[in-house]
Amino acid sequence: MTSANIKDQPAGFSFAQYVTCLNGIVWREGLRFLHQRERFVSALVRPLVWLFIFAAGFRQVLGISIIPPYETYILYEVYIAPGLMAMIQLFNGMQSSLSMVYDREMGNMRTLLVSPLPRWYLLFCKLFAGTAVSLLQVYAFLLIAWFWDIEPPTIGYLTVLPALVLSGLMLGALGMLISSGIRQLENFAGVMNFVIFPMFFASSALYPLWRVKEGSPMLYYVCLFNPFTHAVELIRFALYGRMNWVSLAVVGGCTAVFMIGAVFAYDPSRGLSRRGPAGGET
Amino acid sequence: MMEPEKPIVGNNLPDLAPKFDPRGTALSIENVSHSYGARRALDDVSFTVAPASFTALLGLNGAGKSTLFSLVTRLFVIQAGRISIFGQDIGLAPGEALRLLGVVFQPRTLDLDLSVAQNLLYHAALHGIDRREARLRAAEVLARIGLADRADSKVRDLSGGQMRRLEIARALLHRPRLLLLDEATVGLDVNARAHILSHVRRLVTEQGIGVLWATHLLDEIVPSDDLVVLHQGRVLAHGQVARIIADTGAQDINSSFMCLTEAAAELGSLSR
């Protein structure tokens, strides 16, 4: 009966339709972001506090020797700028991924998930859109940082873009994987304490790994195996027009693994099942 | 932004959905069960919705209506049973099934901070409809629901009834052949309710869309409708309203519903 009829028709979707879908999701995420000014401001204030206050205070305490990709002695502010860029993406990735699973975005997730395009693709688009928003935040940060004498080579602003896309996808996918997998992490405070802070502090964001090694060889290895370290280093090198192949491999590999894991683990009934569907409906 | 285009009335644009057998069953639910942990929300539910028909899914709050909707829309994974839309299995060919389906969920799912047109264009993009075509269709559906002059208004500024009409218009943007509405009139005043209901009934008669209308309000049902009575996750009756009333020996749908649910309660206490 019907199935025979339908098989005669071209099933599935054209490449152009996939692109239309991606554009639409990124466009909407951008519009929403522009409407949420508080989110933008808080996303910027956080790294700027680190830059203006923390870095200024630590400038005299921590000496930085010449390490690649830097070719001269640098100020501590210059050193931590890539780490703060990655931190912006870390917060953004966790926030947008958690909201996909738990909070009021549920209504919007329903709209998204009844799209006939494959679910893995819809989730990828959503992650990509979150990454696009993080790029706006990072470039706004770079603009302000420029007035604070953090002036990477002009070409660096361009070469850092692919690195930021990859690290943004990795952190967004990680957020989705975490929020799908761990029951107890229901609020953002939990994620801050157990994911964001450990990842951020046990990385090369605030101090070069050779200094960590001097202090604690154990912590050095933790940092070395932390994917966030490699996101930071990928961004750091790319910002100065250089490539860090090891970091690229780690970030690329982790992105693939986290994304596949997140697509498998993502279950739209999560966050609902404890009390039935949203709003007390059944 | 929407261009001030002349609204197009009618259905003269190419349809993205693949061809389907219009005589086939619009929606087929076969032996579907679903549990949330130990709680059983749906128990061996089976019924069908014919094309160009208005089928009311009647049940009190907690009957399992929204769970059923979540299963039909692929939001939840089907635990047991089979659901198909015009012969397309939602588990095996979700893409082909979902492109034939439009849905209006009970909670509002519009972006309040975006404009009316932006909400429609976003939905169109999710169905792979390109910008140009989407603009045409948006103008068309907005004209049909009398919101053509509100295209650039923020959704937040619309009334509850207008939001619902917009949600219905959005659900029709990709030209589905089956429309699901979950308690679409909840929270609306009498006029808005009547307006929405008559609008949806017109979709059935004028465009041949199959409609599944979930409600707990008996006054939304007329004798010529098809009716599925869902109670505590089970189908108590399925058929034309007039026939169900006759079968239960009741005077009207109200007493018929009472009769069915009381019988189910007695059966429940006996089996315990």
Image: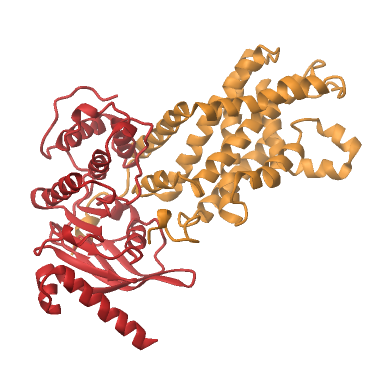
Chain colours: A orange, B red
User: Does residue B37 appear in the picture of this structure?
Assistant: yes
User: Residue B234: percent from the left, percent from the top?
Assistant: 31, 73
Above or below, B84 against B236 in this view is above
Image height check: is B53 above or below A13? below
Left or right: B72 with respect to A93?
left
A54 relative position to B87: left or right? right
Q: In the rendered image, which quarter contains the N terminus of chain B?
A: top left
Q: Residue at x 20, y 27 (%)?
A: B149
Nearest to the observer: residue A121 or residue A12: A121
Residue B157: x %, y % from top left:
31, 31
The quadrant in which residue B243 appears is: bottom left
Q: Position of residue B119 (x, y in %)?
A: 32, 35
In this rendered view, identify the residue nearer to me: A31 or A262.
A31
Q: Quadrant of residue B212?
A: bottom left
Q: Give the x, y percent position of residue A112.
A: 39, 45
Q: Is residue B242 above or below residue A3?
A: below
Q: Residue furthest right?
A: A214
User: In this orientation, does residue A69 appear?
Assistant: no
Q: Residue at x 64, y 39 (%)?
A: A251
Count the labels in the image. Answer: 0
Q: Nearer the viewer, residue A9 or B73?
A: B73
Screen quadrant of the C terminus of chain B: bottom left
Check the image and report above or below for A60 versus B248.
above
